[in-house]
């Protein structure tokens, strides 16, 4: 079964970008904390540039504030990039065609048997 992704809504790309940006902000914050604590414990204050010693003395409230600000900054940047990427994809898909996905027609049921079904069929008899 062949399907083609012809369009991605820009707001959907922005939502995904926002979520990835939030996660990236938290991950980079954790890496930053580990590096700062490692540098503080390794005695490398002598090789730091002037003014960087204050980074090693940050307390709990300022670390949380830096986490929130960096996560929001990452999420905003990624949201804008996600929306722009969706617009660029839509333009390219209009010119050259969308991404084609080939899916298998059979899906395994919960009882172990296989049945043929269309995963994109939204008609449900209730």
Image (cartoon, rainbow, N blue to C red):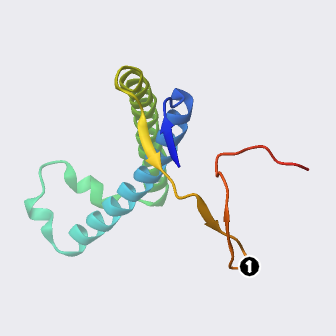
Residue 62 appears in the figure: no
Residue 104 appears in the figure: yes
Image position of 47 (left or right of 67): left
Instruction: Please report the residue visible at 51 percent of the width from the left and 31 percent of the height from the top.
Output: 8
Q: Is residue 74 above or below residue 49?
A: above
Residue occupied by mark 1:
111
Residue 54, image x and y in percent?
Answer: 27, 53
**Displayed quadrant of residue 35:** bottom left
Viewer-side residue, 122 vs 70? 122
Residue 113, image x and y in percent?
Answer: 69, 76
Image position of 93 (left or right of 108): left
Q: Is residue 106 above or below residue 113?
A: above
**Displayed quadrant of residue 29:** bottom left
Image position of 49 (left or right of 52): left
Instruction: Please report the residue visible at 91 percent of the width from the left and 50 percent of the height from the top.
Output: 126
Residue 103, image x and y in percent?
Answer: 51, 54
Which residue of the protein is positioned furthest toward the right in this rendering?
A: 126
Q: Residues within 10 Å of mark 1 (few under 14, many from 20)?
A: few
Across the whole image, how many numbered discs are drawn on residues? 1
Q: Is residue 113 above or below residue 25?
A: below
Image position of 13 (left or right of 35): right
Residue 107, image x and y in percent?
Answer: 62, 65
Viewer-side residue, 13 vs 98? 98
Which residue of the protein is positioned furthest toward the left in this rendering?
A: 47
Viewer-side residue, 5 vs 56? 5
């Amino acid at each position: 079964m062949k399907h083609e992704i012809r369009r991605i809504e820009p707001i959907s790309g922005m939502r995904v970008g926002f979520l990835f940006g939030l996660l990236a902000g938290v991950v980079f914050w954790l890496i930053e904390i580990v590096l700062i604590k490692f540098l503080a414990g390794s005695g490398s204050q002598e090789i730091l540039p002037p003014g960087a010693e204050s980074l090693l003395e940050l307390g709990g409230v300022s670390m949380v504030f830096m986490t929130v600000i960096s996560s929001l900054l990452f999420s905003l940047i990624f949201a804008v990039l996600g929306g722009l990427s969706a617009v660029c994809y839509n333009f390219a898909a209009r010119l050259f065609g969308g991404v084609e996905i080939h899916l298998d027609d059979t899906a395994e049921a919960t009882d172990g048997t296989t049945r043929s079904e269309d995963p994109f069929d939204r008609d449900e008899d209730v």
